[in-house]
Image (cartoon, rainbow, N blue to C red):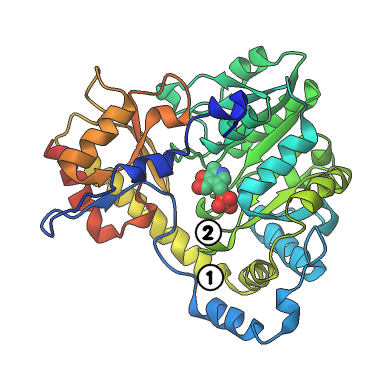
Amino acid sequence: MQVSGQIAAIQPPPITEVKSWLAGRTFPAEKPLIDLCQAVPGYPPPTELIEHLKQSLDDPLTFKYSPDEGLPQVREAVCSWYQRYYHGSPTAEQLCLTIGASQAFWLTITSLCLPGDEVIVQLPAYFDHPMGLQALGIKPVYAPFDPETAGQPNLETINNLISPKTKAILLVTPSNPTGAVIPPAQITALFELAQARNISLILDETYNAFIGSSPHQLFNRPDWTDNFIQISSFGKTFALTGLRCGALIAAAEFIQQTLKIQDSMVVCQPRPTQLALEFGCRYLDNWVTKNAAMMQQRHDQFKATFLATKTDFELTASGSFFAWIKHPWGSLTGRQAARKLVDEANLICLPGEAFGPGLEPYLRLAFGNIDVTQIPEAVARFEQL
Ligand SMILES: Cc1ncc(COP(=O)(O)O)c(C=O)c1O
């Protein structure tokens, strides 16, 4: 079977790879597997949303295509969600509903870049970003990880990486894998850098609902449309990851161009997803606030327990879904260290190098899908090694 060299050179999907290590393994009841692998909310969507979707199944319209960019009433509901969360909002024409944040990323990159172009990517990078760029023949140019600042982007470093081939600066806030949140003032400065260098600032804000305050003020600037593109996911916000619920926010003219890709790629976000999204945006603010507080508490508990534990693992950075730790085995890669954790601690997590070159000393722990009561046991597994 033929496969292009460009695709063959890409790393395998990290979660699939790591989960394949579990094949044929069983874990004893006294030391069950602890899964810190995937960043999914460990709780289901609320009953009201499920009931709403159940009722929609009686309507034949539920099973039909929608306009490529999504139903007008759903996009309006998303805009009002933005107004509440960002105190500033795109208009419905500046928004396209997508199959998760993942597809919003593909719409962005395919509309913005040509093969051979460069995109500046902050390390550690959300692995699907370099994988997507490489698949399209676009070069990720990495801004190095600085453990001292927990991986916060440095303006001067990024400025120095911009070349005539650079199309965009791509950042994730809150970060997957470190959990670090880029402060609003720094986002303004990065936007102004993009503006000055005539490139785009792309922010993947998949975890924006978990910050607890307005993530930035860019939507209040009349000029945001010239240089800003936002990738959003409501999968984590409303615990709908399986419904594939995302959005792309950009200038209306840019959205118009991306619809050419949208149409040929997927046509539209599935209607049941749109119905769930509309319901979430209209009625679930309190539920989201409650869960964001619970995730914050989970993080605080994890951090406090980890720091109080005698272990040779170091907590380098952490935030609401994630901890980014340094393993003590200098001679091992992150992959080897993660395998050792499966074999000796019955704990599964992701190797640092899945998030970019040179990150072998690190591991990513996603504690979003374990309950607060499991945290002491999860941390104890590191102490016992
Ligand atoms: C930073 C980041 N972007 C995008 C995604 C994908 O989101 P979606 O499930 O909405 O495609 C994830 C999922 O974990 C993520 O962590």
Q: Position of residue 135 (x, y in %)?
A: 63, 31
Residue at 64% in and 82% down: 57
Q: Position of residue 211 (x, y in %)?
A: 51, 50
Viewer-nearest residue: 194 or 109: 109
Residue at image mark 2:
241
* Vertical order, 298 against 303 (above or below): below
* Vertical order, 369 against 308 (above or below): below
Q: Position of residue 73 (x, y in %)?
A: 79, 70
Mark 1 crowd level (few <14, some 14–19, many ≥20, 10 Å Cα): few
Q: Earlier in the sequence, mark 2 or mark 1?
A: 2
* Numbered tag placed on residue 252 in the rendering: none
150 with respect to 156 (left or right) = left
Q: Is mark 2 within 8 Å of ligand 1?
A: yes
Residue at 62% in and 49% down: 101
Residue at 43% in and 50% down: 39
* Numbered tag placed on residue 286 in the rendering: 1
Cα distance between the residues tagged 2 and 1: 19 Å
280 with respect to 107 (left or right) = left
Q: Position of residue 103 (x, y in %)?
A: 66, 48
Residue at 19% in and 51% down: 376
Instruction: Specify whether residue 63 is in view.
Output: yes
